[in-house]
Image (cartoon, grey):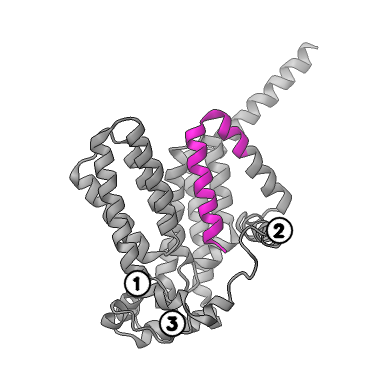
Amino acid sequence: MVGEILLVQRIQCYWWQVLSHLSSHRFNIALIFFGILLRVKLYLANNSFRLDEAWLALDISTRTFSKIILAKIFSYDLPTPPPGFVLIEKAFITLFGNNEYAFRLFPLLCGIASLFLFYELLKKSVDRFTVSLALFFFVCSDILIYNSSQLKQYSSGVFVVLLLYHLMLRVDSLKKMTISHSMGYGLAGAIAITMLYPSVFILAGIGVTQISSAFYKKEWEKFRGLLFSAFLWFTVFIIIYAVYCYYMFHNQIMQQGTNPYFVWSFENAQFLFGWFTQVFLVRTVGLVPFWIGLYFILAGAILLMRRNKKTFSHWLYLYFSFFWLLH
């Protein structure tokens, strides 16, 4: 009996030592560098442009910086890419030449930077073991690896979303919000809108949550600062919509490519459920079967909700931001 107890204690001690090593800072850094290798390997393969990439490359290479700013696009029958993303891409091919490597360098850098940003965000929100587990899924996600070497705004979009949530947590921790804080927060959100159109909805959720919280707690200085930041976001959104998105949203060819079902119909619910399971669970979770990813998502959500409801609400919003972004 005593021998069996000692054996169980040794197994438990060994198990906790394994978990301690797997959740160590060195192990997490090794995971990040493994993710960098996966992304760089695919980037160096230099695969040929897909059709949508080729159209975007043609649009960027044939326009000058002034035409990009003035929204003189290559064809009004194509989606209008975010101007901030296009300007950065134009700068890269101007510096490094008009080739696939130059076009895909910015998405690669965003994919690598997202690994470090996600790690920092995890450390502020969850325990050590959960950090390593979530980081593993993020590192090995095939859709994130793939988009890091594609001429699309998805990789930079992930980086922008993570950066916005970092800024959100930093502003939440502020007891007083100075003019410089408010101006910097507003400019960061404004730049995000020029880089990623869906960031409008992310900023709307962040702004409503933070402004209502400051009002409820009677933090009037912070309340005024957040209102000023939100005003900057709204102003840039109006400009972006009027200058860059108006033709795209009123183009018949673009409208024909949207979901034909009514937004609250049963058919739309079926479409969204199938989209969610295929895109986010099967593709985004990465190198694991569907049911394992689903188990970890549900179990992690329940545990996080029990431990810290505020952190749970932040991660839930981040989760669905990624779901909507990586379509």
On-image quarter of the C terminus: bottom right
Residue positioned most to the top? 2
Mark 3 vs 2: CB contact within 8 A: no
Q: Is residue 159 above or below residue 118?
A: below
Element at label 3: helix
Q: Amino acid at mark 1?
A: Ala
Q: Which residue is mark 1?
A: 242
Q: Which residue is mark 3?
A: 57
5 or 287: nearer the viewer:
287
Magenta region, residue range: 300-327
Q: Which residue shows up at 28% across the image and 46% down it?
A: 227
Distance (Cα) linking label 3 and label 1? 24 Å
Nearer to us of marks 3 and 2 is: 2
Q: Which residue shows up at 42% across the image and 44% down it?
A: 120
Q: Is residue 118 above or below residue 327?
A: above
Q: Which residue is mark 2?
A: 266
Taking the image as shown, residue 123 lies to the left or right of residue 278, namely left
244 or 12: nearer the viewer:
244
Distance (Cα) linking label 1 and label 2? 33 Å
Q: Is residue 83 above or below residue 223?
A: below
Q: Amino acid at mark 2?
A: Phe
Pinpoint residue 105: horizontal percent, then vertical percent. 41, 71
Which label's residue is closer to the chain start, 3 or 2? 3
94 or 312: nearer the viewer:
312
| Residue 107 in which image quadrant | bottom left
Residue positioned most to the left? 179
Res. 185 in view? no
Element at label 2: helix
